[in-house]
């Protein structure tokens, strides 16, 4: 199975799920151990390949041994190893990894190491991206009155996952381990959703209001749409756009489960879509959750660092710039555009926003921290952008910028008329 994953043809979680389906006799614990071992190999692949060079056994078997060593107690693992394998493993475990070159130590390809090295606290970021993430869920504010209520329910239902309120999002709950949330009744009733805390904060940045027209321009399987719709109290109209009809189809049962009736899903063409053109100048808020390298989510999808290449990054950058142009056309004067990625690379983030602003003086950058301050306590940023990192915030890496489209200035005569009207109304 590891060989199949390492072709990089498909995302690792898909290959793993398929393999587990093909092996139905494996018990629950074995399944969890195999999954953890595979993800450990993906996180540390470059380092493990370096160690495998000194091994007498086949390359993939070495990787599997190292992955399993991170999951199983030594006695259990060594029972399945030949003597020379055990000796090699013990030799590797004595190596001081801090002496290895940085790209090998943190297991990143050279091109990515060069990019991450330019960021603040690069080493701490690389280390955090290699740690497994906790599981974040959130309440559905449409169906659950308070997070505390849900916390009580979950502490009874799954004490082993030690449910805790997330530090920033007012809706989030952090769970330990890998509980089967999607079998819980609260999940099946649409009261609970799985969503990283950082992703929850993006909906707070959109700050939807009742009765508005809002577009989630890259809605995918609806992760952000769900929370935006709930915050609109399922009023107004929420368009879920995406170029992938398959992804939008996956969102449909989620919308139904969560009780949303204001969502209109539309599979759009990448450019000049007629249905999009009809909404030009109409929406109060537009979210672009842009397709990106996903390099902020390496804790959950470590295969991305091996599947992405500098060339794919360039293609993504072109799509992102185009999406900003297309989606901005849908905004009404005075409307809000939120551009977001789950990348930590400035070229997909700040650079895209700055390029857009330099071409569009009718847009101005708003302070994301200020917008979040009434809903999300304890969260401050240097500068106007939202920038979340696993080492600083214990969330995936997220970026977001809030851009406000100017409202047309009222002509002086009209202002005088409306002032006269106001004064008259006060007299009445
Ligand atoms: C980061 S994912 C969105 C995830 C989703 N918002 C969620 O929370 O689950 C980016 C999405 O952009 C879509 N996409 C790519 N190019 C697009 C385009 N030109 N217009 C609209 N959507 C696009 C992809 O199909 C993908 O679903």
Image (cartoon, helix red, strand yellow):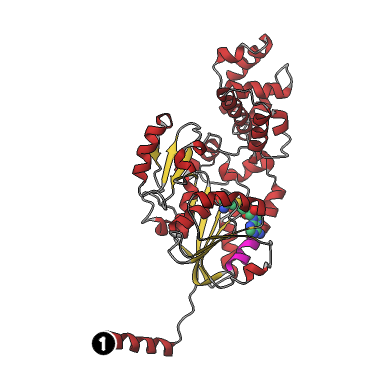
Q: Is the distance from the Cβ of mark 1 to the nearest ligand 1 atom less than 8 Å?
A: no
Residue 85 screen position, x and y as percent: 67, 14
Name the quarter where the N terminus is drawn: top right
Instruction: From this view, report whether residue 106 is shown above or below residue 201.
Output: above
SS type, badge 1: loop
Q: Is residue 325 magenta?
A: yes
Image coordinates of residue 129 in percent, x first then y, are 55, 38
Residue that lies at the very extreme toward the top in this rendered image: 83
Taking the spot 43% from the left edge, 64% from the top edge, the residue there is: 210
On the image, numbered disc 1 is attached to which residue?
428
Q: Residue furthest left?
A: 427
The picture places residue 389, in percent across and down from the top left corner, at: 50, 45
Q: Residues within 10 Å of mark 1 (few under 14, many from 20)?
A: few
Residue 184 is covered by the magenta coloring: no
Taking 120 as reference, is 90 above or below it? above
Residue 373 appears in which quarter of the rendering? bottom left
Magenta-drawn segment: 320-328
**Magenta: main secondary structure:** helix
Whether residue 399 is visible to the viewer of this picture, yes or no, is no
Query: Which of the two residues, 172 or 387, is positioned nearer the viewer here?
Result: 172
Q: How many marks?
A: 1
Image x and y of residue 261, in percent: 50, 58
Where is 90 relative to 149, above or below? above
Return the residue nearer the eye: 364 or 328: 328
Quarter of the rendered structure image containing ligand 1: bottom right
Please state if 294 lies on the left or on the right of 409 as rendered: right
426 left or right, relative to 28: left
Q: Is residue 59 visible?
A: yes
Quadrant position of the C terminus in the picture: bottom left
Residue placed most toward the observer, 109 or 228? 228
């Amino acid at each position: 199975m590891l060989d199949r994953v390492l072709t990089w043809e498909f995302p690792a979680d898909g290959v793993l799920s398929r393999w587990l389906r093909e092996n139905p006799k494996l018990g629950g614990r074995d399944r969890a151990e195999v999954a953890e071992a595979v993800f450990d190999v993906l996180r540390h692949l470059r380092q493990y390949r370096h160690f495998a060079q000194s091994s007498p056994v086949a390359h993939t078997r070495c990787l599997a041994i190292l992955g399993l060593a991170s999951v199983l107690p030594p006695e259990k693992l060594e029972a399945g190893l030949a003597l020379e394998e055990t000796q090699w493993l013990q030799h590797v475990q004595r190596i001081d990894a801090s002496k290895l070159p940085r790209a090998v130590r943190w297991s990143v390809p050279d091109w990515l190491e060069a990019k991450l090295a330019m960021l603040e606290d690069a080493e701490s970021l690389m280390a955090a991206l290699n740690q497994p993430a906790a599981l974040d869920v959130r309440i559905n504010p449409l169906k659950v009155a308070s997070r505390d209520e849900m916390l009580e329910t979950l502490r009874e239902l799954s004490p082993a996952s030690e449910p805790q309120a997330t530090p920033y999002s007012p809706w989030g709950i952090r769970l330990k381990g890998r509980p089967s949330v999607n079998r819980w009744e609260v999940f099946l009733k649409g009261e609970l959703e799985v969503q990283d805390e950082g992703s929850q904060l993006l909906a707070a940045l959109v700050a939807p209001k009742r009765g508005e027209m809002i577009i989630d321009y890259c809605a995918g399987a609806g992760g952000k749409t769900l929370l935006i719709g709930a915050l609109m109290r399922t009023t107004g109209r929420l368009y879920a756009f995406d170029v992938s009809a398959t992804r939008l189809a996956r969102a449909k049962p989620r919308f139904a489960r969560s009780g949303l009736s204001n969502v209109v899903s539309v599979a759009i063409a990448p450019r000049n879509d007629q249905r999009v053109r009809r909404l030009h100048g109409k929406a109060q808020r537009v979210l672009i959750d842009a397709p990106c390298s996903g390099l902020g989510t390496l804790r959950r999808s470590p295969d991305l660092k091996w599947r992405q290449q500098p060339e794919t990054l360039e293609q993504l950058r072109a799509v992102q710039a185009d999406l900003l142009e297309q989606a901005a056309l849908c905004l009404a004067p005075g409307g809000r555009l939120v551009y977001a990625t789950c990348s930590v690379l400035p070229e997909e983030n700040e650079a895209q926003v700055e390029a857009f602003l330099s071409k569009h003086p009718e847009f101005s950058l708003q302070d994301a921290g200020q917008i979040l301050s009434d809903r999300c306590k304890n969260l401050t940023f240097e500068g106007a952008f939202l920038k979340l990192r696993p080492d600083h915030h214990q969330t995936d890496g997220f970026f977001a910028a809030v851009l406000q489209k100017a409202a047309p200035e009222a002509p002086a005569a009209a202002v005088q008329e409306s002032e006269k009207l106001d004064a008259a109304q006060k007299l009445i």
